Amino acid sequence: MPSHFSSAPQLTRRDVLAAMGAGAGAWALAGCRQGGDPGAAGAPTEFHGGTAYQVPPKGHFNLMDGVTDAILGDHFYLDLILAPGAMYRWKEQKWEPMLLEKWHVDEAARTFTCTLRSGLKWSDGRPITSKDAVTTFWCLRIMRNSLWDYLDDVSAPDERTVVLTMKKPSTVVERYVLRQHLHADATYGPWARRAQRLFGSGKDLDTPEGKQLNEEFQAFRPERAVVSGPFDYSYDTITNAQLTLVKNPHGYAADRIAFDKVIVHNGETTTITPVVLAKRLDYATHGFPVATEKQLVRKGFRIIRPPVYSGPALLFNLARLREFADPAARRAVAHAIDRDLNGKVSLARSGRGVRYLAGFSDNLVPQWMSAADRDRLDPYEFDQDKAAGLLTGAGWRRQGKRWLTPQGKPAEYEITFPAEYADWSASGENAARQLSDFGIRVTPRGVTESQQPIDVDKGNFSLAIQSWGTSAHPHPHFAFVQDLFIHNIPVAANQGGRGMGFALRQATKVRGRVDLQRLVIQAGEGLDEAAQRATVTTLGLAFNELLPMIPLFERHGNNPALEGVRVTAWPPDSDPLLQNSPYADNFTIMLLYAGRLRPEKGAR
């Protein structure tokens, strides 16, 4: 089985990859900045944000994609530390170039070529070159990154040019490459060379040598990060409460950003809530409970509600729970849960029960599936009588108010969820309550957010709440990577497990026998969007029939934005940039880079 998958694939949809040279324009938002650096003449200006991170020694500075517990490594604040090649405006379907100044595809040669800006430097003063990019892409291969399902090779003909040779020309390679953070060869070069030798010898990550390389690389702990962005860690001030990012004078756009420091407060929703209510945070993307949101509004916070394009899903451990191997049992569970209620109790207006259950965002389904094909999707309306009929047909039976599995055992399970995620916790607890009322006894249990996904990957769970779809990438390919690869056999291998244990070769009524792994890769291949749409349709219909997981609700942000304290204001809700997913091309990060977020006069 191919082993090039990652928990953080990065890429986007364009009408034709051949048109990508349009990305060669300048960073258009930069013109929106007014005046000089507000902090130059007075006290340093600060922007305050928040997210959970691990402190050293568990938290570390191996920032390569997919390595767990890197400090800010899986959060959008990393974009201020390691500048991406480009960032994307989802509404306008337009790139804003950053470290990369231009790119293009040669369909005949099967190459994607990109050019670095001149004059770029790492925080240690060394130039950023194509050698760093080649090193980055080889290290991604160690981490099973999905980009390598589309690549044969990466080369650097000169110091600013990177050439990626594709197996087949592909639209999704664009986003994988442009949104990729580059990493310094000075730090990662030896690992890249080991990867080149391993794969050049014909071995892969499933061989003993490949497994050893993967394990050793994930255990690599550089003392400090070599960074390209406008900020760097203040290494000596990292505490359990907060960390500080300070200006990196060599960093890309360091002179454009209007703030001198970024303070990141540590914590998930429960911990961060009092910090936000005390107005010590300017912006947060945590899923705040309904009561907290009301408090925030009363205190004068503006609530921004960007689409997130994903949400919580119910996962089954199919290796442990054989009674759910029959898709009819999973369909029964889908009918037994009121998804609208699940979203409402979790996030009120920002939690919307999933309508299509096609495996990717309801916001995007009409763009990729015809009306006729959408009509073929089972909406799995809340209907516990239908649920009971499906279970009975699958060999389950009732005993009083309780269900017995086909093996005659009481249907009793535990559901785990990240304890610190207030919205996912509420979703898990509500799903447990609804299923228990239906006669499938489910006990909810919160597990610390850094451990719970690892437990899922290792198979140490019965039922679990994890993500469906993706808030990181607009092309459905990436949603299906999340649904079918991340906490499943292909990527769970990074933790030595099989995750959900959902086999990717399946028999379906809608399309006969399907190889879902191949279809997910195929969904991003080629330059013909019509052909991709056909593949996405097949995947959507198959997902809807098989329900490898049950999407519960689609989240919209309820992001508090504090205006008039340290930050003057965010743009109006009508600004198209606010349609960006808050977890990918985050609009706040893009506004900071453009100089559009300004310090309040006299604030610090």
Image: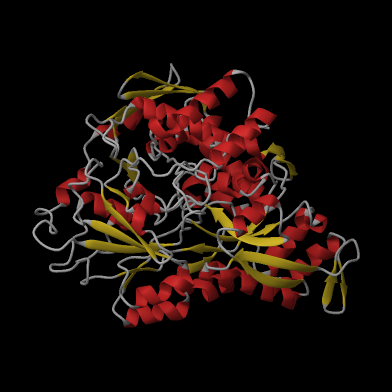
Q: Nearer the viewer, residue 116 or 396?
A: 116
- The x and y percentages for residue 348 are 48, 74
In this rendering, position of residue 419 left or right of residue 48: right
In this figure, what is the number of numbered marks?
A: 0
What is the basis of the colouring in this image?
secondary structure
Q: Is residue 443 left or right of residue 249?
A: right
In this rendering, the answer to whether 258 lies above or below 220 is below
Choose between 187 and 166: the one closer to the eye: 187
- Going 31% across and 81% down the picture, which residue do you hit? 299
3 up-or-down from 416: above or below:
above
At a point 34% along the width and 63% down the height, the residue shown is: 49
Residue drawn at (57%, 55%) of the image = 468
Of all residues, the one furthest to the right in this rendering is: 408
**Is residue 143 found left or right of 398 in the rendered image?**
left
Residue 207 shows in the view: no
Quarter of the image containing the C terminus?
A: bottom left
Residue 347 position, x and y percent, is 49, 72
Indicate whether 474 appears above or below 202. below
- x and y percent of residue 105 in the render? 38, 25
Q: Position of residue 562 (x, y in %)?
A: 28, 70
Q: Quadrant where the N terminus lies?
A: top right
> Can residue 441 be seen in the rendering of this structure?
yes
Along the viewing direction, whichever of 193 and 565 lies nearer the viewer: 193
